[in-house]
Image: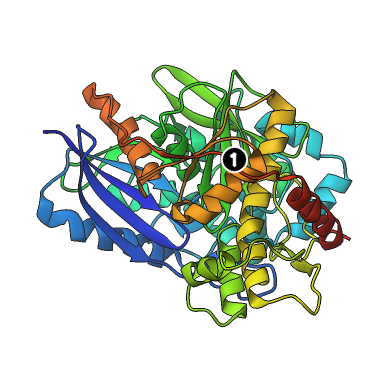
Amino acid sequence: MTRILAIDQGTSSTKAILVDETGAILARATAPLTTQYPHPGWAEQSASAIWASVQKVMAELAPHGRPDGIAIANQRETLVIWDRVTGQALCPAPIWQCRRTAEASARLIAAGHDAQVVAATGLGINPLFPAGKLGWVLKNIPEARPLLDQGRLCAGTVDAWLLWNLTGEFATDHSNASRTQLFDTRNLTFSPDLAALFGAATACLPAPRPSDSLFGKTAEGVPVLAMMGDSHAALYGHGVRSPGTVKATYGTGSSLMTLTPGRVASSHGLSGTIAWSNRHGTAHALEGNITVSAQAAGFMAGLLGLTSASELSALAESVPDSGGVAFVPALAGLGAPHWDDAARGTVTGMTHGTTRAHLARAAIEAIAHQIADVFTAMEADGGRLSGLRADGGASGNAFLMQRQADFLNRPVLQSPLEEVGALGAAAMAFTHFGVDLDLGAAPQTFAPKADPTRDRALWASALRKARA
């Protein structure tokens, strides 16, 4: 029986599963990770801690025997910088949430460069993406430029960092490369012109390959057979293979993705991206990234003196509505489809009658409102969508899923599996063995029950105030 060890390296934790060709998950392991916020707008993680978390979950699964292959799904837009000779990271890794390049991004946009970047990459200039982060590193980390000149500097997304440590190979897949804002998605190559624009360099970047490549082998001879960004892997793990359905991953932030017939330029604040590439060709998609999603629940829980998001949800369900209160969790600006770095977290509509329960409900509903904003933008770009497939930790909250269906006025299909991204990467790896992986049990469907008009108008008003 063929078995794949699938690693899902996320922002708050690293997870791993051992899955066989029937789709059965034979074993699971998880290791937590922390994020540091050393300055306002900055967010970073230890690259060595990321690798240590992967080592930990692999060690926990080792007693189950040697797998036939490894698949990797990873947090995206996080940039790791290391010395090719020593293998040591030069600095903490700026993660996808990091806004340290906001001013530099604004200058490039003001100078009129956004259209050029979008045409090549599908991505509007924004601090989310690694291009500006690499420029920042080359300018601000003293060791970086000399190592670049010596041919010793390696700069890559998390998949490249993990592959390097697992196999000694320096490569990335097309889905992760497409999120760097340095990758020409027509030619499937890193662009020196884009690198020069951001003050970056292509000489330190990994070799881009299809998502189902043989990326290398570990010291024990286990091949790495698939690498994909976590959102892309989740779309694949939901079994989506054609346009018409949206996938939403409810994590620290959220990513919505839907396949498109080809490269599409959004007119409504979304990104064009490569969903994956394989022996059948390159699949393209539209995506919207929300900066603070399920993290909003944890944030509000802390403000209210609660110990968990589940306590917050129970409190939220104790009232029939939010009492006119809206919470916009722009704690690090707003991502898609608004892209407003100046927006700030805002609570509106409080009165003498406002209770902790109303604030709790507003926080839970804020997650669903942001998803609905991106879904609406996707329909504006590409036409009516049939519904939403949900995964990620917060998707297990039935109250949130019901409110999501209400706000979208579409059915929401909640995956019964927590490991959709890992399973998607595993499914890609299994294609090497001619196996079409069974992607699991039928989802639970949440049908719309309530008219969203009032709630959506309340949210729209609060958004305007948060962005004022």
- Image spot of residue 132 (x, y percent): 68, 52
Q: Residues within 10 Å of mark 1 (few under 14, many from 20)?
A: some
Q: Which residue is mark 1?
A: 448
Count how many numbered circles sit on residues in the image.
1
Q: Quadrant of the N terminus?
A: top left
Residue depicted at 80% across the width and 67% down the height: 348
Q: Work out whether 107 lies above or below 239.
A: below
- For the question of whether residue 237 can be seen, the reply is yes
Residue depicted at 70% across the width and 73% down the height: 40
68 or 208, which is in the foreground?
68
Q: Amino acid at mark 1?
A: Pro
Q: Work out whether 248 lies above or below 44.
A: above
Outermost residue toward the bottom? 305
- For the question of whether residue 78 can be seen, the reply is no
Residue depicted at 55% across the width and 48% down the height: 402
Q: Quadrant of the C terminus?
A: bottom right
406 or 103, which is in the foreground?
406
